[in-house]
Amino acid sequence: MSYDVSSWFIDQLELKHSKPKKVFTIGSSDYSERVNKWPKIKRVANRIQSSKVTVKLANDDGEMNFFYDRLWTMPNTCSIQVGYTHPTSGDELLDIFSGDIKEIVYDKNTCNIHIRDRLWTLTEKKIGDSANTVTFSYEIPSDIAWTLVTCYGELSSIESISNPHIGYESFLLWAEQFSTDSILMSAEFSGEKVSEGLKELGGMTDSAIWQEGDGKLYFKRYEAPSSLDFTIDQNDWTKLQIKIDGLRPINKSWVYGGYDPSSDYWAINVFDIDTTAVNTFGLHEEVLKSSLCWLVNSASCQNLAQRIVRNYRYPPKRFNVDTIVKGLHRQIGETVRIVDDFYDLTSGSGWRYDEIEIDVQDFSVAYSMNEAIAGRAFFLDISYLDSTSGDLLL
Amino acid sequence: MPQYLYHPSPIDILYPGSEYQIEGYMNVVYGAGEFTGELTTSDVSSVIASFSVFGLMSQWIYFNAPFSVSNTTLDPILRFGFDGQVVTEVRFDEIKLKTFEEWREEGVIQIYPDFKNYARKTIKNKSDHRTQGGKLYSYKWGDYERFEIPLSYVANSKASIINSWWTGDSTILLKINSGGVWETNSLTFVNKKEPLSARAKPYPEYWNGMLELETL
């Protein structure tokens, strides 16, 4: 899914000459005119990690000293938006970062505001304690995640798209996958932080959890795409780097489940292996084992082991692409075509991006795409097939 | 015998007890040298005030002199005396005679920039990206005007006022008259150091420098 923007906005993103607009607000006050340097905003979904952003504001006149003079003004939410001014309907702006002020540094007539996204707040809240453990038994992983972030993380529990803290539509799609595959988990927490609980849960379900520019948490478990969302060709990118990581393949995956906290014992121990990949690249093993949250049946463990080996058995190709802002309205996890003559990348090549860095100062975007999470998509280009006999043979 | 150049006095009556300031610009066409400026009674029998100004060829030199009178004086006369060998020809501009308070409060300074190195630029604030395929994407954030105004032989009093505006980060209203048309710009100093800080050799009371002004 992508952000809901007008077709006019999308056209503006692709113009060769345009006058974009940047807005920085603290609470409801606009401080855009004071920004000396706009930040780079990085979002990652391949690991659960909070984003930190620093905005430097001019303070030669001392007008920003109110944080120093009145400490109670510091707890506040900031947002960064970019967009364009429509000639008749006014500004159309896209939220690209939202977070809370965590630190302020006054230095050389500038006021540097350090902002953290909502994932950071989950590092400051814990789940139960040693005297009052919190347990979950045979539940869908998404239900456990919902309880963690709403009851213990104190995010909104509104179960609709109006939830201001959670991308509810993405959450429902994520939950549906676990229901379809009948994946159940148990968990026990005794004072761990909510962020750690999410991290373990994400690892044991091979899921991505991140905060988008609108300040909401999103959830995704990658499956093979049925179509590709947008194309980046040589007229869009300024820099392309392909990295093949021979250290990262996983061709044998162990998954432990059925944990008993009282005896500290995992009753289920399964693995999956791709012998061909082992023979070609050597044995690369990974062990998924958690005493905080675990799968409760062999089928779920085997499903996860197979998924890991299927996606990561070969050294994954990673594409790092610097581009214009063409896909600024897209969200992490969307699929993209890359076209390049030198590397023979054609419109049949599809990837997902799991990292994005937006340079607000320079107005450019850098995507990091992972072949592994594209679901090993294979797109058949029938123009290469022999159709002289009238039959299309595979 | 000095040559005298007479200029219409810009004031009809002077009162005792008030402090006055006479100021203006002069540009010597022929006969550079020291001039003596005098304000006399209407019958040229008494000199009310005198000052000296060193005129330079083809340079607009600012002069000013505070003075006061002991008697009420009607229709004073302004004249400049030159004791050189050649016949002199001088141009004057913006001769003003006012009370000292008016001059101090008005905050207006007239300058005559040098033509060489005088610059006016429009600067665009933008980000450019050239893609692999050769397409250029250019994003414009805004633009502003920059003025670079070289000045030379600026008198002490005027230079100190300009430098004080720089110190105080004052908003400068720059009015440019070109071809009879006035153009106004609201600017601020962006000089890293005092704009008029180099002495104009060999005159200790004159200064050279460059005003760097940009729109707010």
Image: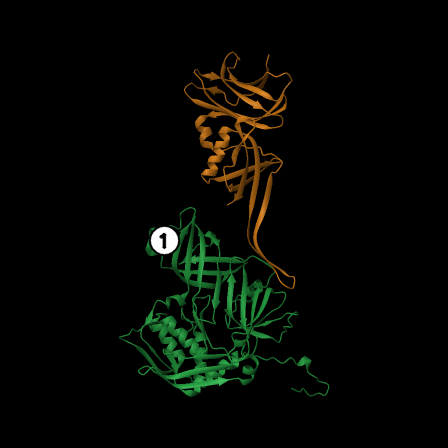
Taking depth in this image into account, of B54 and A317 the one nearest to the observer is A317
- Image: A32 above or below A377: above
Give the farthest residue toward the right: A388
Instruction: Kindly identify the residue that appears in the image at 37 percent across and 74 percent down.
Output: A197
Which amino acid type is marked by label 1?
Phe
- Image: B33 above or below B119: above
Looking at the picture, the colour scheme in use is by chain
Q: Which quadrant of the view contains residue A225?
A: bottom right
**Within 10 Å of the Cα at label 1, are there few (<14), some (14-19), or many (20+) other Cα atoms?**
some
Give the farthest residue toward the left: A131
Q: Is A40 on the left or on the right of A379, as rendered?
A: left
Instruction: Kindly identify the residue that appears in the image at 45 percent across and 60 percent down.
Output: A53
Q: Position of residue A27 (x, y in %)?
A: 39, 58
Colour seen for chain B: orange
Q: Which quadrant of the view contains residue A230?
A: bottom right
Colour seen for chain A: green
Dividing the image into 4 quarters, which one contains the C terminus of chain A? bottom right
Chain at tag 1 = A
Query: Is residue A35 visible to the viewer in this orientation of the structure?
Result: yes
Q: Position of residue A213 (x, y in %)?
A: 46, 66
Q: Position of residue B165 (x, y in %)?
A: 47, 37
